[in-house]
Amino acid sequence: MFDRTNPTQLAAMVSELTLDPVAVGYADPVSRGATAELAGLLAAADPAGAVHAVASFNGEDLLASLTASAAEYNAVIDGFATAAQVPARKLFIGRMLDYGATPIPKRFHATLGQIFSLAGAPTIRAAILAELNGPMSRAEALFGDDTVVTRQDMQAVLAAMA
């Protein structure tokens, strides 16, 4: 997480904007003081290609993944499960969806992988893996997973550069 009150992180961000080591294109927005544009550049995918090893995965991500194939979902929940497994699977998936925008704890990721195995649900599994291993933003590559840099952060950085 980027902390504009942390001198080390502030210096790292000043260096990032000044040196532009992966050619993001900071020079013009810095010269214009375009804080929202700078925050947007830092929120975009890292041009250096950094990816999440295991990204934050929430209930909304799961819902998006499940809608990749309704047929696979129905087959995995009803078709490949024993009668005793169906209610438990439905309850588990429901609880995972209840997380909404909150990250699903990593201890449940393996269970999701088991339910949506490659053989039973290749499309859903691929969608889940794409979410888990998706690209990092430039801000995340610099300061860690789920880092969001705001306009106020950029104002502080530009002030430090002046």
Image (cartoon, rainbow, N blue to C red):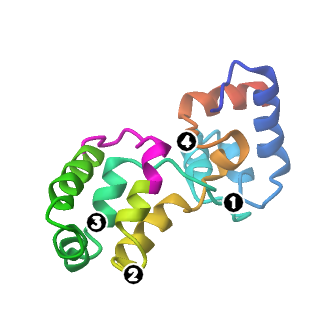
15 or 130: nearer the viewer: 130
Packing grade of label 1 (10 A; few <14, some 14-19, many >=20) is some
37, above or below 154, in the image: below
Q: Position of residue 142 (x, y in %)?
A: 72, 44
Q: Earlier in the sequence, mark 1 or mark 2?
A: 1
Q: Nearer the viewer, mark 1 or mark 3?
A: 3
Extent of the magenta region: 98-110
Dot 1 amino acid type: Ala
Q: Position of residue 144 (x, y in %)?
A: 66, 41
Q: Say which mark, if any, is on residue 146.
A: 4
Q: Earlier in the sequence, mark 4 or mark 2?
A: 2
Cβ atoms under marks 4 and 2 closer than 8 Å: no
Residue 76, quarter of the rendered image: bottom left
Dot 2 amino acid type: Ala
User: Residue 14 vs residue 65: left or right?
Assistant: right
User: Residue 21 vs residue 136: left or right?
Assistant: right
- Quarter of the image where the C terminus is located: top right
Q: Which residue is mark 3?
A: 66
Q: Earlier in the sequence, mark 1 or mark 3?
A: 1
Q: CA distance from mark 1 to mark 2?
A: 29 Å
